[in-house]
Amino acid sequence: MYFWACWFNRRYRLIAYLALTLVLVVLAALPAGLEKLQGHWTVVRITSQEHLAWVWNTGSSNTVAAMLVALVFIGADLGALGLGDDPERGNLDFLLSRPRSRAQLVWSGWFAGLTQLLPMLVLPLVTSLGVLAALTHTMLPGNLLRLSVPLFAMAAAMYTLAFFMATVTASARQGYELAALAAVLFLGYRLILSGEGEFALWRTDWMWECLRSAFDWYLSPHQVFPSANLMFVTGAILLLPYLAQLSFDRRDL
Amino acid sequence: MYAWKCWHDSRDRVILYALASLAIGLMFGAIALAQYHRWLSYAWVWNSHVRRWYMDPVRWAWDWALYMTEGSIFPAALWVALTLGAVSVGREYRSGAMPFLLTRPASRKAFVWTDWSLGLAEMTVILAMMVVGVVSVLCRISRDYVWLSFPPLLGCVLLGAALYGLTHFTTALAGSSMKGLSASAAVILFYELLPGALQEWWRLSGPLKLRDWSLNLWEYKSGVNDPFTLHGWPMMMWLLVALAFPLLSQFVLEWREVKTSRDLCISGHVGSTGAIG
């Protein structure tokens, strides 16, 4: 089964990514429930319901920002290593000798990567919830769970874009570069449209705001209909593997 | 001979990037030229009276063009460094060309330094094209401020050399251009974003200061009390980093075993897909 082969081939990478994301999430969530007193970090003393909500909101916001960066990077990497990596390794001849259609290979490869993104989302989210719950002795997961949907949509969109580019160019590296270029052009287009940044592309505050504002698209009241942006991204996520399949069906080896 | 092979492998990309860079430079030059003509009429009115200061539309046009160039040449250096570094000598392992290359009468050191030097030259040409585009347009107004374009170019080439060296090294270490590119992108992403996050989350200002200092490459005013703004030190640091990476790549290549396709089959590298049914 190609699906399991994809999991097997990327197991070490997935473990490394998961460890990295977990460390980032703990680093992000922990300070929300701590305060610095006389130079030492201590667990914050909750004084009111508003304070409790503030701790959870801060922790959730930090977690989402950290996970967005990590998941977009991981999504691009896994996408480029989807089917795009096999031609470079010379595995494609062997793969196509198996009694499976090309369409099945493309969709199995894509689906394997998508399922690999799921633990990268769920386990850090659970860790963050655990950290915040341990610090506050309360569970208010609403915000974090609500934002996890657009978070996964962003990661899946980046993953699918890289997968599509890598499959079409038959090269993981070129797919990665083209997906990064597409993301940069899209951000640049948004930057020019919004008039922000003034070419100060290297500044952290701008990058941070821009990364966070990814969620604005989903929460914006100016959508054609509620959740229109989310549905548009979901449609693109399903369309791109199909286009990749069309390209792969016609490729000569 | 290896230099010719490297050039042959990367020439399409280099020519494309150089042309794009030139086009961006010409565009910035044209924008600054249009601004110059607008300021010229204001300057005539402004300077016709006694003032504390007088408008210099030529200087303003140069500053405007270089401001735009600085904003673009930094990401361009990052992009070119990543893409050229990923097609360096390390990828020959994955492509299977390394066993053949090592039969040639040249040392492994020669491969590393030839490849690195050529990549650096290509990157310098690509980045210089942007400045050439700007300068060629603005020279129509005045040539007095051409020197202003050199510090950003030098800073970017140095920083680009460090990033190119990093990708060169990670590609050699991983023996794969994709893995090298991915690792290098991760390092850059963390270097850029983690200090800001640590400042915001844990109120640790040290990493952010270090990052800002290291990226402050063409600050003309040196600090008096703050050691983090000493002029010239960031460039020196990046120069050392840029030279350290090819040495590390050389070290990696000299100690690395070369696996033939037969070895890969025996070790199970290809066989991992053998479970596909």
Image (spheres, coloured by chain):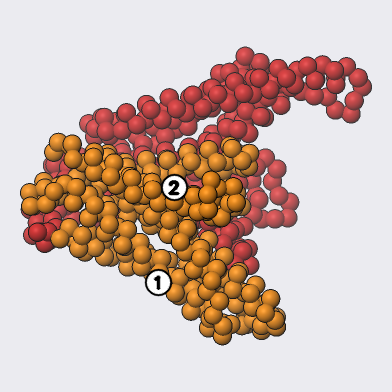
Chain colours: A orange, B red
Q: Amino acid at mark 2?
A: Phe
Q: Is residue A12 visible?
A: yes
Element type at marker 2? helix
Residue at numbered disc 1: A123
A80 lies above or below A140: above
Q: Nearer the viewer, residue A120 or B196?
A: A120
Give how far across and how far down residue B241 sits, in percent.
45, 50
Q: Residues within 10 Å of mark 2 (few under 14, many from 20)?
A: few
Q: Nearer the viewer, residue B174 or A59?
A: A59
Give how far across and how far down residue A58 sits, in percent.
61, 69
Give how far across and how far down residue B122 sits, in percent.
39, 32
Mark 1 vs mark 2: which is more N-terminal?
A: 1
Chain for numbered disc 2 = A
Query: Quick check: marks 1 and 2 in contact, CB under 8 Å?
Result: no
**Real-space Cα distance between discs 1 and 2?**
27 Å
Residue at numbered disc 2: A232
Q: Tell me if B259 is positioned left or right of B148 in this view.
A: left
Residue plotted at (32% across, 28% down): B12
Residue plotted at (68% across, 22% down): B35
Location of residue B27 (image quadrant) = top right
B30 lies above or below B100: above
Chain for numbered disc 1 = A
Do marks 1 and 2 share a subunit? yes
